[in-house]
Image: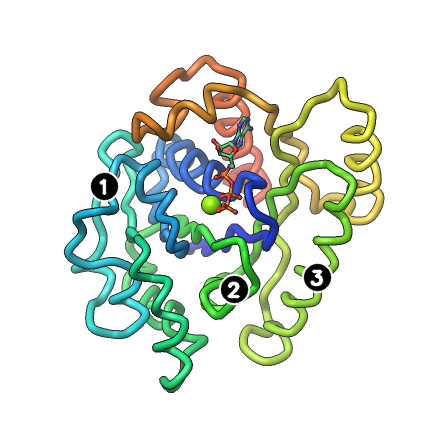
Amino acid sequence: MTRILAITNQKGGVGKTTTGVNLAASLAAARRRVLLVDLDPQGNATMGSGVDKRNLQATVYHVLLGSHGIPETKLRSEKGEYDLVPANRELAGAEVELVAMEHRETRLKEALAAVAQDYDFILIDCPPALNLLTVNGLTAAQAVMIPMQCEYYALEGLSDLVQTIKKVRAHLNPTLEIEGLLRTMYDPRNMLAQQVSAQLVEHFGAKVYRTVIPRNVRLAEAPSYGVPAIEFDRNSKGAQAYLALAGEMLNRAGG
Ligand SMILES: Nc1ncnc2c1ncn2[C@@H]1O[C@H](COP(=O)(O)OP(=O)(O)OP(=O)(O)O)[C@@H](O)[C@H]1O
Ligand SMILES: [Mg+2]
């Protein structure tokens, strides 16, 4: 059974891409077959996977517009040991072009259906917006993983995302669930972070992953070498946290 997860938060810089790359590598390290889909014109997941976004033959843009399938588009992250559907700034034009097309919200879902049986996990790194790209991600996914920083406005932003999830459920993907909320860049000495974290657990209970991702400079450094943190510095706190997250997900799923 393939698990398809959209990593989403319309707030920028909360750790979506860091989570996509490092979770993909951590699940691959647990011998799961993983596909990471970069659905962001910034192409950060692509670069972080060791693939140069500037010279690509085909990207997720071509997949969404229907000229290419995923088998001709996917590349291998050699260091991460997972497959990648790359993206670059060309994708920014997709939104405008898609508006005129039929089934514009289900394009990614249809493309993934053709390859889903080849993977145990498909992770979709969404852009920081509740736009048509993100709607494609939410429509293709079985569940949403929400990385968030425990700061003052985090809970407010969460309610906008929950509204969008409800809309997608009503119109496009009735079984879409919240897979989990992931506390990222966590500093346990920060009182506000502790308070927001406690509120999060109060509201969302067991949906909040027990694993917390600490603020760790190795996680920020690894992308400039195009490798996941478990490859860059396996013993760093950040790498260990993502390995633990993969373990928690696999345990939750019963294996
Ligand atoms: N746990 C962490 N500790 C330290 N730095 C981190 C951590 N997680 C992410 N970062 C850094 O914070 C920045 C934002 O992270 P990232 O790109 O993963 O966020 P994002 O949500 O994908 O951003 P965007 O919304 O722009 O796509 C990056 O420079 C990243 O290296
Ligand atoms: Mg990102």
Q: Is mark 2 within 8 Å of ligand 1?
A: no
Residue 52 is marked as 1
Give the mark nearer the N terminus: 1 vs 2: 1
The one of 144 and 53 positioned closer to us in this rendering: 53
Q: Between tags 2 and 3, which lies in front?
A: 3
- Whether 70 is drawn above or below 119: the answer is below
Q: Give the image's coloring scheme.
A: rainbow
Residue at 74% in and 58% down: 159
The local secondary structure at tag 1 comes to loop
* Kind of residue indicated by mark 3: Asp
Contact check, label 2 and label 3, Cβ < 8 Å: no
Question: Which x, y percent locates residue 212?
Answer: 64, 29
* Kind of residue indicated by mark 2: Leu
User: Is 42 on the left or on the right of 65, as rendered?
Assistant: right
The local secondary structure at tag 2 comes to helix
Cα gap from disc 2 to disc 3, whole angstroms: 14 Å
Residue 160 is marked as 3
Q: Is mark 3 within 8 Å of ligand 1?
A: no
Cα gap from disc 1 to disc 2, whole angstroms: 26 Å
Question: Which x, y percent locates residue 1?
Answer: 42, 55
The one of 231 and 249 positioned closer to us in this rendering: 231
Residue at 32% in and 69% down: 64
Q: Which residue is mark 2?
A: 138
Give the mark nearer the N terminus: 2 vs 3: 2
Answer few, some or many: residues within 10 Å of disc 3's Cα (few below 14, many 20 plus, some between 14 and 19).
some
Answer few, some or many: residues within 10 Å of disc 2's Cα (few below 14, many 20 plus, some between 14 and 19).
many
Residue at 30% in and 31% down: 226
